[in-house]
Each structure stands twice: as C-alpha cells, then as structure tokens.
Image: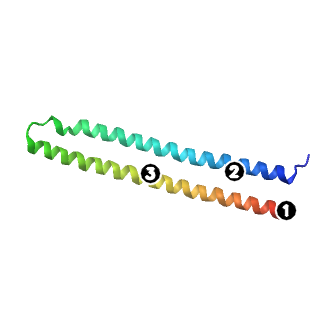
Amino acid sequence: MSRSVNEVVTDELIEHEVQVRRATSGTQRRVEARINQLGRDVKLAMTEIDPFSETDNRERIRKRTELQARVRELSKAAFQEISDMVGTDMARFAMLESDAVMDAVELSVS
C-alpha cells in the first residue's frame, strides 16, 4: 500500500522528534549523574578533611584551605567532563539535524 506524501512527512517528523527527545534526555541524565557524583565527592572531602574538628585556629585554617583546594579540583574535573560530554552530544545532535534536513530535501525532490 502506497503512503501519501503527508503520511511520509508526518512519520519523518515524529521519528525526528523521538530522536531529539532521546538525545536531549540522555544528555540531561548524564549531566545530572555527574553533578550528583560531584556532590558526593565534595561531601566525602569534607568528611575526610573536616576543618571544624580542629581546636587550633592555624590548623583549622590550613584544613579549610586544603578543603577549598580539593573542592576546586573536584569541580574543575567534573565540569570538564560535563563540557566534553555535552560537546560530544551536541556533535551527535548536529548530525541528527543534518540527517533530518537531508531527509526533508530528499522528500521535496522526489
């Protein structure tokens, strides 16, 4: 059975929407997971270093400085991973959009 042009276009649009939603929700899940991991890492660093356990003010300041450095290091690593992840996902998304445009062009000339 032959499908009408409208049916073909509608099917293509629905398929494209499904692919876009998959791409964006996958990226969102991975970013959320990495941010949650960063939160756990920071909490662990606070527990390990614990600047508030010290009674000596100099030692407390030293530990607080150590904690700040560790949190900066953890944050930098996490956000670099997120940046890389999103960049890769955006490259895939660009290909998805390019394919959709090519499909639309093919439909319009056939």
Give the mark nearer the N terminus: 3 vs 1.
Answer: 3
How far apart are labels 1 and 2 at the CA level?
19 Å
Give the mark nearer the N terminus: 2 vs 3.
Answer: 2
In percent of width and height, residue 17 lies at 67, 48
**Which residue is label 2 attached to?**
16
Q: Kindly indicate the quadrant of the structure image that contains residue 110.
A: bottom right
**Which residue is label 3 attached to?**
82
The reply, left or right, for residue 79 in relation to residue 100 is left
Q: Contact (CB < 8 A) between labels 2 and 3?
A: no
SS state under label 2? helix
Which disc is residue 84 wearing? none
SS state under label 1? loop
Q: Contact (CB < 8 A) between labels 3 and 1?
A: no
Would you place residue 84 above or below residue 44 in this image?
Answer: below
Mark 3 packing: few (<14 Cα in 10 Å), some, or many (20+)?
Answer: some
Callout count? 3
**Which residue is label 1 attached to?**
110
Mark 1 packing: few (<14 Cα in 10 Å), some, or many (20+)?
Answer: few
